[in-house]
Image (spheres, grey):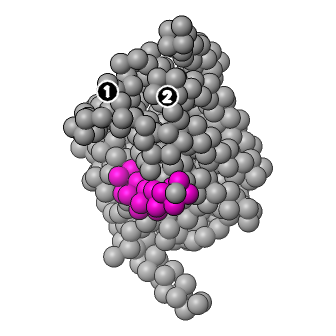
């Protein structure tokens, strides 16, 4: 049963998430442009970019890079499928980490110094956010009584009521996960901040298109995590969750446009301190 | 219509000469003219770029750099020579070390003269370059079809 629902969930997610993620990315770029006093590109600009990349010559520094990227995309899709079909949250978290690891390995495989610096930094980002994300899954289990995301539908009050501290912690690492400034260490969405182009330096054409799609899918999944805190037995709560997701994304864009990049030391320390304070205190309160 | 014309990503290289055109190119890409309206993004990476903006003339030191950047770009790609130095060597044409315009090193698709070239002229040149990009993209598609 769970296998079938996960399969169906993955298929539906694979169709819907890129569409939603693309629109989200387009809105992100328009809102960013308006914040900088510009008109900005059309909403579908990310779609045009990806279509153009797919049209480009298919060349790669080696033959495995694209395979790794395809794996990254596939695991991101499975992770989303598990999450939105009401599956195991812990498994979802591990799947998306696996996806980021494939992305890192793809960058390392090119053996270019620029891509390697990007990959080092991406590894640091994973190190920075992973403790908080794991604590989020554990706190979710303690608060809801199950790792299954579907269990929230039986709740009398949303999870946010008991694990709001974890929510704040997750909000903090979300900026790292979305690779937004001030934590856009491994690759910047805005050109010319980066040592060439960070982790994607050696990826080009169709491979880069797949990377873009992976990011769209990831963004949808992470916003889903945020929404999870606000869903309970009442069907109307889904509307509330969607509203919170929009607000959170806007907040991320706002932060992105208003902060300069920090050093990795600060990112790592602050993310771990946040995880320690928000995660463990909240867990302690729940357990005792 | 090819999608190439909807998202022209540019890379910019200042070969030599007085740097005047270099500053104009950066002025073109800054928020005042908002190139992103047309999908223009300034990438620092030849592997991501579609349009190669070169300013300044070619000399013995930079000819290999220009060729290298050009070779790293993927098809379809377009080269725009910005400023009279990049077009023909300009006022530096008879310097002992200057070879000439960018077309001495790589094929140039669009010439944007001016000393210094105005941002408006650069935008015109990029729009012109986008049309060429479209043609090349179509040609590449035909080629791919033929190969199958
Ligand atoms: S064309 Fe004029 S402004 Fe431009 S680089 Fe040459 S000398 Fe300088």
Identify which residue is drawn at 50% across, 13% down. Answer: A286
Query: Residues under labels 1 and 2: Cα distance?
Result: 13 Å
Residue A156 is labelled as 1
Residue A34: quarter of image: top left
Q: Is residue B72 magenta?
A: no
Say whether mark 2 and mark 1 are on the same chain. Answer: yes
The main secondary structure of the magenta stretch is helix
| Count of numbered circles in the view | 2
Quadrant of the image occupied by residue A95? top right
- Density class for disc 2 (Cα within 10 Å; few <14, some 14-19, many ≥20) is few
Magenta-tinted stretch: A2-22
Which percent across, then down, holds residue B114?
38, 54
> What kind of element bears circle 1?
loop
**Label 2 belongs to which residue?**
A145
**Camera sees residue A269:** yes
Dot 2: what SS? loop
Residue B51: horizontal and vertical position, in percent?
Answer: 48, 60
Nearer to me, B144 or B69: B144
Q: Earlier in the sequence, mark 1 or mark 2?
A: 2
């Amino acid at each position: 049963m769970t296998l079938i629902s996960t399969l169906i969930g993955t298929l539906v997610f694979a169709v819907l998430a890129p569409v939603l993620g693309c629109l989200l990315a387009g809105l992100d770029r328009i809102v960013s442009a308006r914040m900088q006093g510009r008109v900005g590109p059309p909403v579908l600009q990310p779609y045009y970019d990806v279509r153009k990349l797919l049209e480009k010559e298919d060349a790669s520094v080696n033959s495995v890079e694209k395979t790794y990227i395809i794996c990254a995309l596939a695991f991101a899709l499975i992770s989303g499928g598990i999450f939105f079909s009401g599956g195991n949250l812990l498994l979802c978290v591990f799947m998306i980490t696996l996806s980021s690891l494939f992305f890192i390995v793809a960058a390392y495989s090119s053996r270019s110094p620029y891509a390697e610096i990007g990959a080092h930094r991406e590894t640091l980002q994973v190190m920075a956010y992973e403790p908080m994300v794991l604590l989020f899954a554990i706190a979710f289990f303690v608060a809801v009584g199950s790792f299954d995301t579907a269990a929230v539908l039986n709740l009398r009050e949303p999870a946010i009521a008991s694990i709001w501290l974890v929510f704040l912690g997750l909000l903090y690492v979300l900026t790292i996960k979305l690779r937004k400034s001030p934590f856009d260490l491994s690759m910047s969405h805005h050109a010319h901040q980066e040592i060439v182009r960070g982790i994607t330096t050696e990826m080009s054409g169709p491979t880069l298109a797949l990377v873009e799609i992976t990011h769209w899918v990831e963004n949808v999944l992470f916003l889903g995590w945020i929404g999870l805190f606000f869903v309970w037995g009442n069907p109307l709560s889904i509307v509330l969750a969607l509203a919170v997701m929009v607000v959170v994304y806007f907040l991320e864009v706002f932060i992105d446009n208003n902060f300069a990049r920090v050093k990795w030391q600060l990112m790592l320390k602050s993310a771990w301190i946040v995880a320690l304070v928000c995660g463990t205190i909240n867990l302690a309160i729940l357990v005792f | 219509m090819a999608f190439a014309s909807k998202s022209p990503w540019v890379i910019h290289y200042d070969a030599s000469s007085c740097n005047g055109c270099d500053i104009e190119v950066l002025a073109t890409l800054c928020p005042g003219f908002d190139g992103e309206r047309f999908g223009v993004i300034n990438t620092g990476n030849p592997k991501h770029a579609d349009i190669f903006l070169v300013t300044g003339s070619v000399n013995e030191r930079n000819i290999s750099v220009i060729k290298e950047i050009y070779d790293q770009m993927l098809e379809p790609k377009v080269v725009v020579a910005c400023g009279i130095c990049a077009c023909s060597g300009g006022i530096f044409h008879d310097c002992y070390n200057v070879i000439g315009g960018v077309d001495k090193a790589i094929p140039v698709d669009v010439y944007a003269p001016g000393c210094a070239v105005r941002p408006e002229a650069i935008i015109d040149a990029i729009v012109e370059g986008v049309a060429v990009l479209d043609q090349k993209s179509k040609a590449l598609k035909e080629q791919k079809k033929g190969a199958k």
